[in-house]
Amino acid sequence: MNKAFVREPDQTADYCPRCGSKGEPVGSETLRAILSENQRARITDAANFCPAPKCEVAYFDCFGRTVSAAELPRPVYPKDETAPICPCFGLTRDDIEQDVEEGSPTRTRAIVEKAKSPAARCKQMAANGQPCVAFVQKYYMQCLNAKRPGRAS
């Protein structure tokens, strides 16, 4: 078939201009809480968070303008593995690893419950404006699976 008649896929504003990952839409409340006034002026209120851990872009808009993770006032997960997975209550990867080592998901369960409470301020604290539960559960399962006999660590 002649390539002149093949339509190329549309690249939309939903994809990170640096790495191509599908962005997670964030609201203006999240952007106001995390970014400085100058940083917010560089992108539109209809921005996305790039969830790719290794990508240097934190936020981007439909015009391809970006704010890098290095510019943020504090480290955010998953851009920085040492940042709390749950910024509202401070749960870290080390806490989850400790739960797995101890054989009891005490800290992990407590955070999942707290994330459902009014004390959770995900829109202001989480880089993507969403509850941390999915990240917490995913990392817990990764650690648990790595610990099981016959699995590579």
Image (cartoon, grey):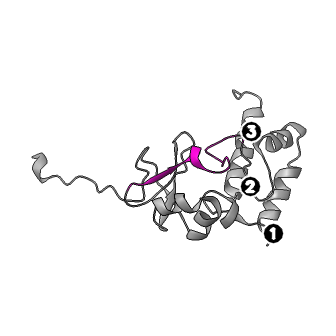
Whether tag 1 and tag 3 are in contact, CB under 8 A, the answer is no
Q: Which residue corresponds to mark 3? A: 143
Looking at the magenta stretch, what is its main secondary structure? loop
Answer few, some or many: residues within 10 Å of disc 2's Cα (few below 14, many 20 plus, some between 14 and 19).
Answer: many
Task: Decide if residue 49 is on the left or right side of residue 121.
Answer: left
- The amino acid type of the residue labelled 2 equals Pro
Pick the residue in front: 67 or 88: 67
The type of residue carrying mark 1 is Ala
Report the span colored magenta. Answer: 64-82
For the point 77% across and 59% down, the residue is 88
- CA separation, marks 2 and 1? 12 Å
Q: Reading the chain from its start, which is encountered first: label 1 or label 3?
A: 1
The residue identified by callout 2 is 87
Mark 2 or mark 1: which comes first in sequence? 2
- Mark 3 vs mark 2: which is more N-terminal? 2
Identity of the residue furthest to the bottom in this view: 118
Above or below for 30 versus 109: below
> Percent from the top left, x then y, of residue 83?
71, 45
Residue type at numbered disc 3: Cys
Neighbour tally class for label 3: few under 14, some 14-19, many 20 plus, Cα within 10 Å: some
Magenta span includes 66: yes
Inter-mark Cα distance, 1 to 3: 27 Å
- Kindly state the secondary structure of the residue where label 3 is placed: helix
Residue labelled with disc 1: 119
Q: Secondary structure at mark 1?
A: loop
